[in-house]
Image: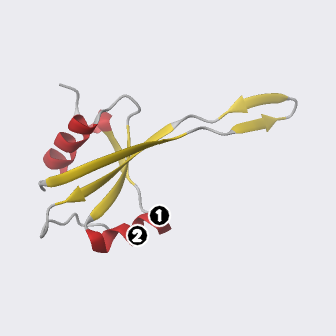
């Protein structure tokens, strides 16, 4: 089994993710190869909460130009984790 720190990279605190908080949803940046089951187990172990549902999506990297060369930013995978009623993660 892979370590929690390799699956969950960070808890994202963005303007859009702050609208999820009253609904009991949290946005995480996760490893590109992690699946929903691994994400669920990692969040439950790291934050000591019960997870109801996990939705994932991949944000594709963008093309960037540096001087005369084309480059590309990395693809990132994000997970929207819904907790059971009454569960909460303390966000600083």
Disc number placed over residue 18 in the picture, else none: 2
Label 1 packing within 10 angstroms: few (<14), some (14-19), many (20+)? few
Residue at horizontal 25%, vertical 40%?
A: 39
Image location of residue 68, percent across then percent down: 88, 30
Which is nearer the eye, 5 or 72? 72
- Report how far apart the C-alphas of labels 1 and 2 lie in the structure: 6 Å
Query: The C terminus is located in which quarter?
Result: bottom left
Q: Is residue 49 left or right of residue 60?
A: left
Q: Is residue 86 left or right of residue 18?
A: left
Disc number placed over residue 55 in the picture, else none: none
**83 versus 54 height, above or below:** below
Q: Quadrant of residue 60?
A: top right
Label 2 packing within 10 angstroms: few (<14), some (14-19), many (20+)? some
Image location of residue 28, percent across then percent down: 36, 50
Which is nearer the eye, 68 or 39? 39
Specify whether residue 46 is in view: yes
Q: Which residue is mark 1?
A: 14
Residue at horizontal 32%, vertical 32%?
A: 34
Q: How many marks?
A: 2
Image location of residue 45, percent across then percent down: 14, 45
Q: Is residue 50 left or right of residue 61?
A: left
Residue at horizontal 28%, vertical 53%?
A: 81
Image location of residue 1, percent across then percent down: 17, 25
Question: What element does badge 2 sit on?
Answer: helix
Looking at the image, the residue that sits furthest to the bottom is 22
* Cβ–Cβ under 8 Å for marks 1 and 2: yes
Specify whether residue 47 is in view: no
Looking at the image, the residue that sits furthest to the right is 68
């Amino acid at each position: 089994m892979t370590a929690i720190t390799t699956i969950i990279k960070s808890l994202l605190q963005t303007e859009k993710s702050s609208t999820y908080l009253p609904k009991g949803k949290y946005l995480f940046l996760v490893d590109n190869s992690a699946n929903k089951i691994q994400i669920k187990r990692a969040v439950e172990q790291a934050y000591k909460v019960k997870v109801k549902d996990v939705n994932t999506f991949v944000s594709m990297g963008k093309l960037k130009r540096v001087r005369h060369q084309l480059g590309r930013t990395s693809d990132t995978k994000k997970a929207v984790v819904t907790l059971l009623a009454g569960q909460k993660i303390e966000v600083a």
